[in-house]
Image (tube, coloured by chain):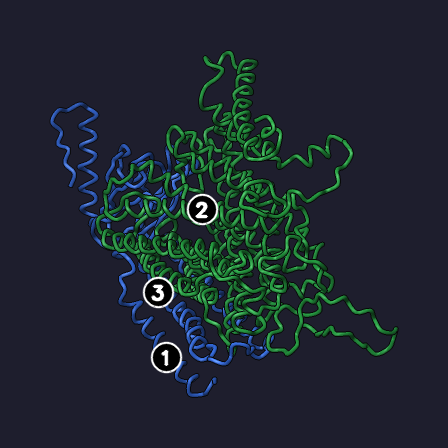
Amino acid sequence: MVSRRSIVGTIVAALIATAIGIVLSYVIHWFPVQASTQAHNTDTFYHVLVIASVPIFVLVVTVILYSVWKFRMKPGEELKDGPPIHGNTRLEVIWTAIPAIILLGLVSYSFVVLKENEKKPVGPEMVVNVTGQQFAWSYEYPRSVTGGAPLKTTQLYVPNNESVRFEIRSLDVIHAFWIPAFRLQIDAVPGITTSYRATPDRLGAYPVVCNLLCGVGHGLMRSTVHVVRPSAFHTWLQSQSRISAGASTGQAGAPASAS
Amino acid sequence: MVAKLRAPGLYRAFFAFLVGIAFAAGLTWLVRMTTGHATYHHFLSEEPVMAVSLITAPLFFLVGLGGFDYWFYWASGRPTRPEDHSSHGARSWKDYFRINTDHKVIGIQYTVTAFFFLFVGGLMAMLMRIQLAQPGAEFVSANTYNGLFSVHASLLIFLFVIPVFAGLANYVLPLMIGAPDMAFPRLNALSYWLLPLAGLMMLLSFAAPGGAFADGWTAYAPLSIDAPIGQDFFSVGVQLAGASSIMTALNFLVTIITMRAPGMSFFRMPLLVWANFATSLLVVIATPFIAASQFFVLLDRGLGFNFFDAGKGGDVLMYQHVFWFYSHPAVYIMMLPGFGIISEIIAVKARKPIFGYRMMAFSLLAIVGLGFTVWAHHMFTSGMASWIRIPMAITTCIIAVPTGIKIFSWLATLWRGILHLDTPMLFALGFLATFTLGGISGVMLAMVVFDIHVSASYFIVAHIHYVLFGGSLMTIFAGVYYWFPKMTGRMYDERLGKWHFWSTFIFFNLTFGPMHILGLQGMPRRVPTYAAKFADLNLFISIASFALGATTLIFLYNMVTSWRGGPRAPANPWRGLTIEWQVSSPPPVFNFDRIPTVVGSPYEYGVPGAVHGTFAPAPVPATVGGAAGGSGVVHRHTE
C-alpha cells in the first residue's frame, strides 16, 4: 500500500504546497504601512516566522491527507486491525530535538530583534509624555523639547528619523497606547509610568489606538500620530506654544490653527 | 406542600433560595445597624443585599436541594443510616433533576447543561457579529456589547469547555478503570449542581442595574473595581464554577489513584485517564488563584480595600499576575482532556496502538509542570518589569515541545493503520489540522517582539479560537459522537454527523482565519466598532459566523432525534478494547457485576487475542517456582 511512488509523489506535492505557501506569504498584505525602523525589523521577523511555520503545517496536513488516501479502510477490512507498532525511539528523538532546535533558534533571533528595537539610540531622543484617560489620549511636550513651558496638547506630532520615547501614564484605568504603523504598544497603568521608544521613518499620519478594554468608550478611543519633517515639527511646536501662550494671557481671537 | 418542603429536591431548593435572599437582607441590615450609623441613611438598600445574596442564595439553594444532607446528618452525631442507594441511578427523566450519586447520571447532567451554555454563549457571539458586520453599527449599545463578549467568554470557558470535559470523563472514566463509581459520589453530585447556579448567575447579570459585567472575562482591575454590580455576578459566579471544578478534580485524583481495577498499573491506563489525571492536578493547584483574584476584587469593591488603588499603596499589576497564574493553566485544563479523547478515538479508529504511549503520558505531565511557568506571556505589554519577558518567552517555547510530540505521535498512529473515517474520526483529524494552526500562532505570540505589536488585537482572538474551537470544541464533538452510543444506548445518524463535521470545519476556518489579518492590520479586540478600512473583512467574517452558528443546529437535531429514537446501539459498536466497551450500552446501574482484572495494555490492536480487561476470575498462581500454567487469560507483556 505504501509504495515508493506514492511517497515520492506526496513529498513533491508537499514541497510544492510549501512553495505556494511561502509565495502567498509575500503576496498577502499582512501589515499596515511601515512607519518606523522598529516596524521594518518586526515585519522581517514575522516573515521568518511565517516561512518557518509553512513547512510544519504542510507536513502535518500532508500526513493526514496521505493517510486518509492510502490507509482508508477498504471494503472487506471491517474487522481488520493495523500492525501493532508501539513506537520508534529514533523517530521520537528526532521529532523532539528538531522542534526544540527550531524554537531555540527562533526565540534567540527574536531577542536579538527585540534588543535592536528597544536599544537606546546614538543620536538625540525626544521625550513625549502621553496620558490616557477615559476616553482620550493627551500629550505633553516637556521643557526639554519646547525650550520653555511644557506644551499640553491633544495632537501628537513627531519629527521624522529621530527617536522619540513615549512616557505613558493613566489617570484612571488601564489603557494601551498602540501605534500599529510603528508595531509598538504598551499598557498605560495607573500608578506607574511605562515607556517605549520609536524611530519614525516615514512621513504621514497614522492611527493611534487604545488597545486595552477601558470601558464603554474603548472602541472610540483613538488618536493620530503625525510624522513630519524636523523643520515642520519645530514650526508646529512654536505655533502651538504661541497659541497656548496667547490663551493663557487671555488674548481674544487667538487662532486655533492646527496644521 | 409541607411534605414537598421536607423532602430534598428542587421544590425545597427554590424556597431555600428565597430564604437565602432574606438572610442576606437580614445580615446586611444587622451589620449596618450595629456599625454603620455614620455612613448609611438606609440600613437596607438594593445593591448590598443583592451582592450578599449572590453568596448566600446559591448556598441555601444547595442545602435545600439536599446536597449537604448526608454530611449534616453525619455531623450531627446520630447513628449512621445504611446506604440504600436511593439517590443512585436514573429510571426516569426526573432523576436527572435532583441530587444523584450515579457518575453516569452526573456525567449526562454535566454534558447537557454545558451544551445549553454552549448555545447561549454562541448566540451571544452571533449578536456580537451582527454588531460588527458594519462599522458604526448601533445594533447594541457599547455597554451591552461589552457585556456580550464578557459573558460569552465566561460562559464558554467556565460553563462549557471545562465542565463538558468533566462530564464526559465523569461518565467514561470509572467505567474505563473498572470502578463501580467515583471515589466520592455525593461530592460529585454537589459539584454538578454548582454549575447551573454559576451559569444562571452570569446570565442574570444582564438584568442587574448597570448591565452585565462588561470588563471581559479577564476583569482587570481597576476597571472592574468601579464597575456596576453586574461585575459581582462574575466575581462570585466564577467562584461557584471554580468550586465545582476543584471538587471534581479532587474526585478524579482519588478515584484514579485508588480505584483502578486490579492489574491496571499507571502504564496500563488509557490515555484518557492520564489526561484527566493531569488536568485534575492543574485544577486543584491553579483554580484557587482565580478565586483569590476575585476575592481581592470583591474586597476592593464591597469593603473599600485598596489592593488595586495605586494612590493608596495598591498594585494594579498584581491582579494580572494572580489572575493569569490560574488562567494560563486554565487553557491547559481546557485542552488536556481533549488530548485524551483524541488518543482514544484515533487508536480505535486507526486500529493501531497509540504511537509512543509513554511519551504521550510524560508529555501530559510535562505540560502540567511547564504550564505553571508561562503565565506572564499574557503580560508582555502590561508594563511589568521588562526582564520577566525573557524567561517567560523561553518557557512558552519549551512547552511547545511536548505538545508537538503529541501531534506527531497521533500522526504516526494513523500511519499504516486501517482508518475508519466516521464522524468521531473526522473531528479528530480536523482537530489535528486546526489545533496545529492555533499552536503555530501561539509560538509566534511567544516571540516578545511580535507580541508587542499584536497583543490584545484580533490576532489574539484568532489564536484563542483556533485553539479553543478548532482545538477543544472539535475534541468535544468527537468525544460526544464517540461515546453517544455508550451513554444513550442508541446510534447517532452518521450522515448528519458528517454534514456537521464538514460544515463546521469549513465555516470555522472562514470565520476565524481572516481575524489574524485584522489583528496584524491594527484592529483591537473588545470593540463594538472599528476603523472603516476593516469593514470588508468584518462583514465577511460576520456572514461566515452566521453559517457557523447554523451548523450547530445539525448537531442539536441529530442528538435529540437519535437519543429519542435512533437505532439501538450494541455494547461495543467501535470494537474498542477499553473496559467501557465491555459492558452494555448503556451500562448497568452499578457498572459491573464483577470488577474486571486488567491483564494488558489498552491499545493492543493488531495483536491477535489481545485482552485489556477481563471479567474471568483471576487465575490462581499454579505452583511456586513452577512454569506458569495460565487458565484462559492471556498475559501480555506491555510496553
In the picture, which chain is green? B
Q: Amino acid at mark 3?
A: His
Q: Which mark is residue B135?
A: none
Task: Say few, some or many: other residues with alpha carbon within 10 Å of mark 1 (under 14 / 14 to 19 / 20 or more).
Answer: some
Chain identity of mark 3: A
A197 with respect to B403 (left or right): left
Q: Which amino acid type is shown beneath numbered disc 1?
A: Ala
Query: SS of the residue at dot 3?
Result: helix
Q: Which residue is mark 2?
A: B116
Closer to us: mark 3 or mark 1?
1
Dot 1 falls on a residue whose secondary structure is: helix
- Around disc 3, counting alpha carbons within 10 Å, would you say few (fewer than 14), some (14 to 19), or many (20 or more)? some
Residue B556: where, in percent of width, then height?
41, 53
Residue identified by numbered label 1: A13
Q: Residue at x 42, y 34 (%)?
A: B205
Res B450 visible: no
Mark 2 secondary-structure assignment: helix
Residue sitting at x 18%, y 33% = A242
| Residue extending furthest toward the left | A253
Residue B631 percent coordinates (x, y):
78, 74
As drawn, the residue found furthest toward the right would be B624
Who comes first in sequence, dot 3 or dot 1?
A: 1
Residue at 49%, 62% in the rendered image: B567
- Residues at marks 3 and 1 on the same chain: yes
Chain drawn blue, letter? A
Q: Quadrant of the C terminus of chain B?
A: bottom right
Q: Looking at the rendered structure, which numbered label has been put on residue A47?
A: 3
Quarter occupied by residue B622: bottom right
Q: Chain of mark 1?
A: A
